[in-house]
């Protein structure tokens, strides 16, 4: 019988710690191999951490609410399973005298060659560390299944996947190329041969640092943003459509009611809830924009969950999500938008408030920009950017004739995934959105 450390595994690029949110097992409980033992939360996701050995939970080293560093031991498991010495996910703490005296002939041979996996293996377990390396390096599931494992039961260890990457970069592209079907859905298909698909600067292209240059380390959120943006560009062929919208009616309406609204509700009314209100109506008109891609399947989402980009005081960006946005009226959206934006800037959002979006909007007009080409937040297939509202000369048509007048106009920029959204759908969508804004009823009550 031996004691093993169950450590907090790597949770993703830039994540250095997590909060223990709950124990799924108690001291003395039996644990099966790959069975979840505890739950943790990072700034982005909640996760269950499984045991990599069968046994009995002997000791808990942290309590709920504790912040744990990546790699710290969280629990001690008593087990009689044999673990190879090169298993870097678990450490041996001790063994009984009987095991220590076991004849060498009974020990598993360390020099045995692993059997290559020629096809995907159902039920094969991969540690969070191995899965994260595969994700960052653009290794598909099919390719991962083919990597020979030297760990217990043929499991792929960190050394296995790192050695594979070294050989992969030195192997001709045709020997490691994914199948046509998997390449279409995988970031690695768009990466140059021999280079990682993560999008970061290759090791052989070094940055020259000159005297006076300042080196600024990315914080955790900036690393995550960088990774997500690169992944989105590798995943989705981005196309943009632009429409200029006359929002004079909305501007006049807001100017008329904003002081009374502030006095009555104790908060400001912005243009964003109005945009989201009509964005939802447009999505209902064109439901095939509210979809996600799973390989060669299109998943049309039942719920309309609108992500709204919020700039943080740190300069970073976060996208809280309004779940079931079609269930809110204009007042409800105003309250929700203000609440999410405020708590985003105070770093008080809950993990489930930044996931699950099906379509997003970003207000680049806040920074004085008139147009932009936003990057789609995966796994969504489209995002709308609204530019600055400007006073512009315009031709105004009347029964008595045309004349030049001053109107409030803005440019709408629609980025969409050309794998599933063609120019007709993407173009008609932004045009319908503009029509809703232009036909706004100035007598609307809120």
Image (cartoon, rainbow, N blue to C red):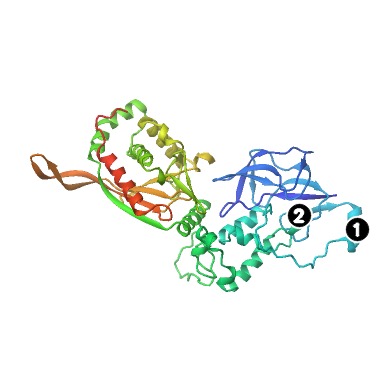
Gap between marks 2 and 1 measured at Cα: 19 Å
Disc 1 element: loop
Q: Quadrant of the C terminus?
A: top left
Q: Kindly tell me whether residue 165 is visible in this rendering.
A: yes
> Can you give x and y, in whole percent of width and height, for residue 312 in the image?
43, 46
Image disc number at residue 91:
2
> Can you give x and y, in whole percent of width and height, for residue 193 in the image?
52, 70
Q: Identify which residue is drawn at 42% across, 39% down.
A: 341
Q: Residues within 10 Å of mark 2 (few under 14, many from 20)?
A: some
Viewer-proximal residue among 226 and 332: 332
Viewer-proximal residue among 445 and 295: 295
Of the numbered discs 2 and 1, the one sitting upstream in the chain is: 2
Disc 2 element: loop
Viewer-proximal residue among 426 and 20: 426
Q: Is residue 12 above or below residue 350?
A: below
Image disc number at residue 332:
none
Q: Is residue 206 left or right of residue 89?
A: left
Q: Kindly tell me whether residue 372 is visible in this rendering.
A: no
Q: Identify which residue is drawn at 23% across, 36% down.
A: 252
How many badges with numbers are in the image? 2
Q: Residues within 10 Å of mark 1 (few under 14, many from 20)?
A: few
Residue placed under numbered mark 1 in the picture: 102
Which numbered mark, 2 or 1, is in the foreground of this view? Answer: 1
Q: Is residue 122 above or below residue 60?
A: below
Instruction: Name the residue at the top extreme.
Output: 264
Q: Is residue 279 above or below residue 132?
A: above
Q: Quarter-wise, where is residue 38 in the image?
A: top right
């Amino acid at each position: 019988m031996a004691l093993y450390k169950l450590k907090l595994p790597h949770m993703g690029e830039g994540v250095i710690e997590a909060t223990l949110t709950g124990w799924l097992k108690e001291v003395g409980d039996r644990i099966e191999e790959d069975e979840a033992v505890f739950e943790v939360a990072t700034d982005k996701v909640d996760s269950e951490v499984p045991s990599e050995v069968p046994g009995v939970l002997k000791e808990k080293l942290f309590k709920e609410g504790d912040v744990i560093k990546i790699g710290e031991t969280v629990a001690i498991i008593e087990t009689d399973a044999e673990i190879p010495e090169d298993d870097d996910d678990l450490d041996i703490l001790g063994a009984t005298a009987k095991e220590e005296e076991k004849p060498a002939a009974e020990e598993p041979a360390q020099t045995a060659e692993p059997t290559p996996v020629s096809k995907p293996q159902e039920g094969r377990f991969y540690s969070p560390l191995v899965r994260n390396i595969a994700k960052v390096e653009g290794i598909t599931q099919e390719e991962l299944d083919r990597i020979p494992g030297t760990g217990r039961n043929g499991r792929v260890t960190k050394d296995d996947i790192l050695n594979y990457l070294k050989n992969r970069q030195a192997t001709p592209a045709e020997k490691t190329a994914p199948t046509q079907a998997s390449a279409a859905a995988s970031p690695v298909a768009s990466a140059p041969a021999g280079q990682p698909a993560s999008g970061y600067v290759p090791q052989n292209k070094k940055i020259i640092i000159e005297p006076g240059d300042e080196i600024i380390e990315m914080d955790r959120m900036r690393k995550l943003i960088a990774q997500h943006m690169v992944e989105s560009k590798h995943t989705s062929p981005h196309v943009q459509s632009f429409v200029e919208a006359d929002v004079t009616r909305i501007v006049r309406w807001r100017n008329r009611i904003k002081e009374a609204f502030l006095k009555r509700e104790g908060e400001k009314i912005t243009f964003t809830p109005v945009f989201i209100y009509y964005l939802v109506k447009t999505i209902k008109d064109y439901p095939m924009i509210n979809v996600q891609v799973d390989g060669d399947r299109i998943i049309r989402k039942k719920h309309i969950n609108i992500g709204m980009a919020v700039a943080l005081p740190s300069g970073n960006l976060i996208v809280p999500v309004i779940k079931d946005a079609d269930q809110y009226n204009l007042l409800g959206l105003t309250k929700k938008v203000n609440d999410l934006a405020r708590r985003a800037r105070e770093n008080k959002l809950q993990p489930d408030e930044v996931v699950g979006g099906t379509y997003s909007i970003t207000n680049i007009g806040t920074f004085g920009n008139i147009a932009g080409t936003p990057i789609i937040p995966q796994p969504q297939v489209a995002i709308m950017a609204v530019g600055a509202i400007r006073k512009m000369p315009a031709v105004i048509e009347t029964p008595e004739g045309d004349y030049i007048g001053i109107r409030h106009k803005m440019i709408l920029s629609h980025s969409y995934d050309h794998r599933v959204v063609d120019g007709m759908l993407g173009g008609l969508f932004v045009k319908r959105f503009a029509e809703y804004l232009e036909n706004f009823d100035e007598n609307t009550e809120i």
